[in-house]
Image: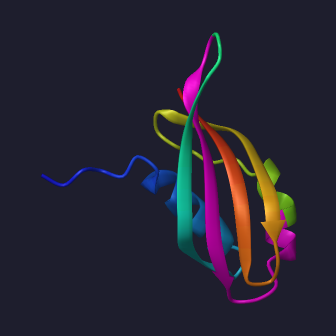
Amino acid sequence: MRRRDPYAPLLRALADDAARHGLALTLCDLTERSWASATFVGCRLTIVVRIDGGDPARWLADLPEAEFALAGRLVADLVVRAADRAAATLEVLLLEA
């Protein structure tokens, strides 16, 4: 039985958003840490992507304010930790909705 990747919808949403800016993303690394508060449960993801297709500066600047429709999940926070023309490290707080 093949296990469904719980982060695939988020990664697809990021790739689709980048494509609207003329960019292509390739996942290089993804790490997860469990996260919880008194009212929410989720995880903090660190995502490293390679970026192809042009200058990603505008996309990266707009990314923290982007809205992503994810069934059963909510992107509560998204921060661009490091970036250049070829790669970016994103930190995402992903909550179970």
Task: Identify the residue at horizontal 60%, vertical 19% (top origin).
Answer: 40
The magenta segment is 39-60
Residue lying at the far top of the rendered structure = 38
The image shows residue 7 at horizontal and vertical percentages of 46, 51
Q: Is residue 55 magenta?
A: yes
Q: Quadrant of residue 60?
A: bottom right
Q: Is residue 5 above or below residue 60?
A: above
Q: Is residue 17 magenta?
A: no
Q: Quadrant of residue 55?
A: bottom right
Residue lying at the far left of the rendered structure = 1
Along the horizontal axis of the image, is 77 left or right of 12?
right
Task: Identify the residue at horizontal 63%, vertical 53% (top origin).
Answer: 46
Task: Identify the residue at horizontal 72%, vertical 64% (top origin).
Answer: 89
The image shows residue 11 at horizontal and vertical percentages of 53, 59
Q: Is residue 32 above or below residue 62?
A: above
Along the horizontal axis of the image, is 19 left or right of 34?
right
Q: Quadrant of residue 51?
A: bottom right
Name the image colouring: rainbow
The image shows residue 97 at horizontal and vertical percentages of 53, 26
In this view, the residue in front, 72 or 4, is 4
Task: Identify the residue at horizontal 54%, vertical 46% (top origin).
Answer: 32
Q: How many marks?
A: 0
Residue lying at the far bottom of the rendered structure = 53
Along the horizontal axis of the image, is 5 left or right of 27?
left
